[in-house]
Image: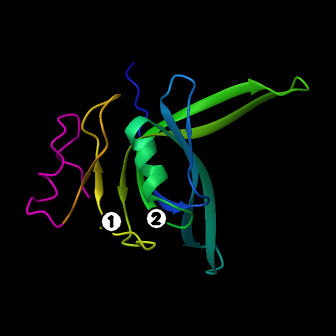
Amino acid sequence: MASLNRVLLIGNLTRDPDLRTMSNGRPVCNFGIALNRNYKDSEGNRKEETTFVDIECFGPRAEAVGRFFSKGRSIFVEGRLKLDQWESKVGEKRSALKVVLDNFEFVDSKQDGSTVPPQAYNKKTEEGASAEISSPSSNTSSSDSHSDPDLDEDVPF
């Protein structure tokens, strides 16, 4: 039977991205986001529920997230779920569910003093490719800026 493991999230970073280099020289970036859900309870009172999600990314995307994002900034994340399992020092079994980022987009226009305009990150190729940032001020439409054949053209947003 076929399976699907795809996650789409929009949230705010809960901490500055932690950009590191693995022993093989490949960049890895870890950060967390908060997702807020507003609803009314059975008595009609407005409630807010916050879910915290850990995100991990690699390669050029890791470098771009580490460079352009900071705590509090909004981000759109597209990725997949991954379950990490390990044993603690005292022998207890532990696990954590996280999202491995495949693609992202800037959601806000917050600049933090930089001269970089709000942009979308294009996932051109897998490993070894340089990160490409496309400016929305260019004369191409948003569908033209995603020339990756792996991306679906019928995404509803």
Q: Is residue 146 above or below residue 38?
A: above
Q: Which residue is mark 2?
A: 74
How much space separates mark 2 and mark 1, taking CA atoms? Answer: 15 Å
Q: State whether the magenta stretch is mostly helix, strand or loop.
A: loop
Magenta span = 137-157
Closer to us: 76 or 122: 122
Q: Which residue is mark 1?
A: 116
Residue 155 inside the magenta-drawn segment: yes
Q: Position of residue 156 (x, y in %)?
A: 24, 55
Closer to us: 118 or 80: 118
Q: In the image, what residue occupies the spot 16% across and 58% down?
A: 142
Mark 2 belongs to which amino acid?
A: Ser
Q: Nearer the viewer, mark 2 or mark 1?
A: 1
- Mark 2 nearby-residue class (10 Å; few <14, some 14–19, many ≥20): many
Mark 1 belongs to which amino acid?
A: Val
Q: In the image, what residue occupies the spot 57% across and 63% down?
A: 71
- Mark 1 nearby-residue class (10 Å; few <14, some 14–19, many ≥20): few
- Drawn side of residue 20 relative to residue 155, left or right: right
Q: Position of residue 50 (x, y in %)?
A: 62, 63
Q: In the image, what residue occupies the spot 56% across and 66% down?
A: 36
Q: Is residue 108 above or below residue 22?
A: below
User: How many numbered marks have been drawn onto this rendered protein structure?
Assistant: 2
* Quarter where residue 82 is shown: top right
